[in-house]
Amino acid sequence: MADGKKLIQILLILIGILLNNCLSIAMEKPYHHLPDGTFRNPEGSPVRSKDIKFSYRTFIKEKKKIDITVPKDHVIDKKIVKENLEKFKDDDYIAWIGHATFLIKLGETTIITDPVFSKNAGPLIFGPKRYVEPALQLKEIPKTDVFLLTHNHYDHQDMSTIRGFPYKDAKVLLPLKLGKYFQRYKDVNEMDWYDEIKINNDLKITLLPAVHWSKRSLTDMNKTLWGNFLIEYKNKKILFACDTGYGNIYKDLGKKYGPIDLTMINIGAYDFRPMFEKSIYHTTPEEALKVAQDLRSKKVLGTHWGTFVLSLEPIMEPPVRFKASAEKYGFKKEDAIIYKIGEFGSFKKLLDYN
């Protein structure tokens, strides 16, 4: 009888250990979730050196030296933009509004990415001013069904645009803890990395990791998540990158999700000399091509340039370096794509489908 009781006690202890282990596994958070509720980049991502010092005074001094004369061929005439909006209304298209703002129409669904229509990228009247107007004004954009927001920096999350956005019935997809900014919207979906949302039978969108950070004030460093969006339409894949630096995560994503048909990725805001050589959170044009190569992308389109002065490279340098380095990373020059602000392109031609 004593042996029986001892056996039951041992079994109960073993069951308790097993349940405790199962509970620990269930409660274990992903690597990018920190115990204090903030977030971090994927494992193995570059880390900013503590020796790097940003000087706002130096930045403003050097910024004044930048020539912001805009070449005429950088911007499509407004009349042509409106004509193309009508011309492409029954087609699948992509149109560059400026910076990271694109209109993407796939079937009956129109998507807008990181819409910023304000005159400056900052709180109230502060922050970098646009030196190129948006291709369309906010009131001129077509009916939009999906609103994608990659992260909370002012040149991506524009509260004036969010408040004035005319289609608040659009489905909003954004990273964790950003939903609070969209209280007047009807369908707001916070997403963690690798979460998927099915828009319709032909369209699915997944939030994927990016090498970046988040901050809008002195006290909210990395309190909201950031990420890239993978847009899958029928049998085609388009990756719209958050601001991102280069990291080993892209090789992993390429193995899991590649090949990608079109990678849309930042090629500007990288040079901060003489303070430090480059940002680890924004790819250079060459690193952008390397990311696309890791993703096994067939084509790559440069974004996040030609609108605001956010760093110290010449404003027209990114596309030149991007094109010049394409072949080194396995792309034909024509497959390293640079748009003009206001340019429309047919997805059916771009990605070769009917």
Image (tube, rainbow, N blue to C red):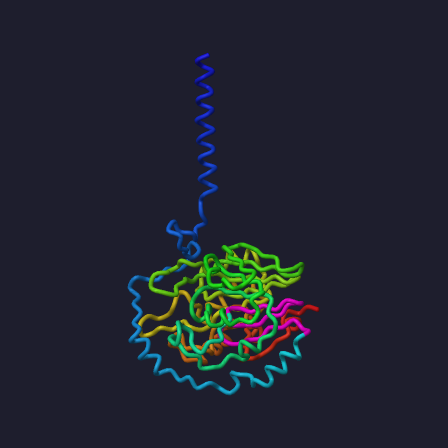
Residue 292 visible? The answer is no
Q: Nearer the viewer, residue 121 or 46?
A: 121
Residue 185 percent across, percent down from the top left? 53, 63
Q: Nearer the viewer, residue 318 or 120?
A: 120
Judge from the rendering whether residue 57 lies leftward or rightward of residue 107; answer left or right: left
**Quarter-of-image position of residue 2:** top left
**Quarter-of-image position of residue 225:** bottom left
Residue at 53% across / 85% down in the picture? 73
Total numbered labels placed on residues in the image: 0
The correct choice, above or below, for 111 with respect to 83 in the image is above
Judge from the rendering whether residue 274 lies leftward or rightward of residue 246; answer left or right: left
Residue 58 percent across, percent down from the top left? 29, 76
- Quadrant, the C terminus: bottom right
Residue 53 visible? The answer is yes
- Residue farthest toward the front in the current orientation of the protein: 184
Judge from the rendering whether residue 134 lies leftward or rightward of residue 66; answer left or right: right
Helix, strand or loop for the magenta stretch, by majority: strand
Judge from the rendering whether residue 162 lies leftward or rightward of residue 354; answer left or right: left
Residue at 39% across / 65% down in the picture? 216
Residue at 53% across / 54% down in the picture? 194
The correct choice, above or below, for 1 with respect to 45 in the image is above
- Residue farthest toward the right in the current orientation of the protein: 354
Magenta stretch: includes residue 99: yes
- Residue farthest toward the top in the current orientation of the protein: 1
Q: Give the magenta-colored segment's residue range.
A: 90-114
Residue 287 percent across, percent down from the top left? 46, 67
Residue 192 percent across, percent down from the top left? 50, 55
